[in-house]
Image: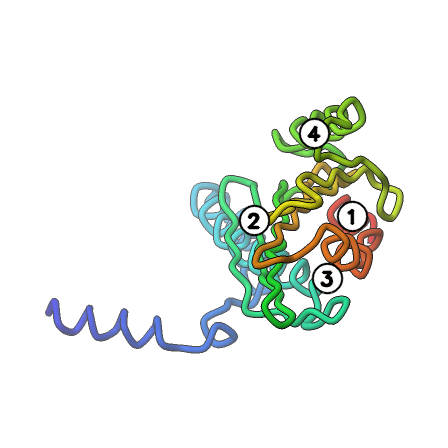
Amino acid sequence: MKRTVLAGLLALALLPASVRAEDINAIFKKVNDLIAAKNYSKALEELGWAQKELEKMNITQVQSFFPDSLAGFTGSKFEANSALGMTNIEREYSKGSEQIKIALSGSSAGGAGAGGLGGLAAFGRMAAMMGGGQGQDTFRISGRTASLQNADGGSPQLQVFLDSGSVLTLEGQNGTTGDSLKSVAEALKINELDNYLRGQS
């Protein structure tokens, strides 16, 4: 019996994501049917599954804002996770020996300042505006406050504080310069990404 269950789970895990994914419309139909039957407990369970499917769809949509090529850098595979209303997406880009890791951290929910990270982004923006210390430069990219640290060092970091409350972080390695981080950030469609995260697209 245990072998049969294990084999079934393994077969399910090996199915393509498109096959495993449930039809979101079918899930909502189940929810409506369960509500009509006053089976609210089961309806809440189905809504939980709907949320999981929507989180997958949201991650896929956000990933579309990070193309395979940016300012001469080529992107590798994504790393993404979404839990407790927070989404984190990372992708590495390389050009020769230079490497840049881009990370987007924020709330899965739309709306400016949504979730706890909204306050963190606002705090980071304020700190950047008040900063300007040694090795730090503050400027704007696509109208958003950005802070570049260790511009001339071996591992520069550029943060862009989005109006949606999310934070876009670019980290350079292997001789990547601050100017390269700026070029890659400017090549991103930050306006469109931020509007999507705010639920305005």
Question: On the image, numbered disc 1 is attached to which residue?
Answer: 194
The answer to which quarter of the image holds residue 10 is: bottom left
SS at badge 4 = helix
Which of the marked residues, 1 or 3, is nearer the chain's N terminus? 3
Which of the marked residues, 4 or 1, is nearer the chain's N terminus? 4
Give me the disc on residue 65.
3
In the rendered structure, are the residues bearing label 3 and label 4 in contact, judged by CB atoms less than 8 Å apart?
no
SS at badge 3 = loop
Question: On the image, numbered disc 4 is attached to which residue?
Answer: 124
Residue 165, how many percent across, how many down?
A: 71, 36
User: Of circles 3 and 4, which is in front?
Assistant: 4
Who's the residue at 57% across and 47% down the image?
87
Q: Amino acid at mark 2?
A: Asn
Who's the residue at 83% across and 48% down the image?
200
Q: Amino acid at mark 3?
A: Phe
Whole-angstrom CA distance, mark 3 to mark 4, is 23 Å
Question: On the image, numbered disc 2 is attached to which residue?
Answer: 88
Outermost left residue = 1
User: Of circles 2 and 4, which is in front?
Assistant: 4
Residue 57, how many percent across, how many down?
A: 61, 61
* Residue 45 falls left or right of residue 185: left
Q: Amino acid at mark 1?
A: Asp
Give me the disc on residue 78.
none
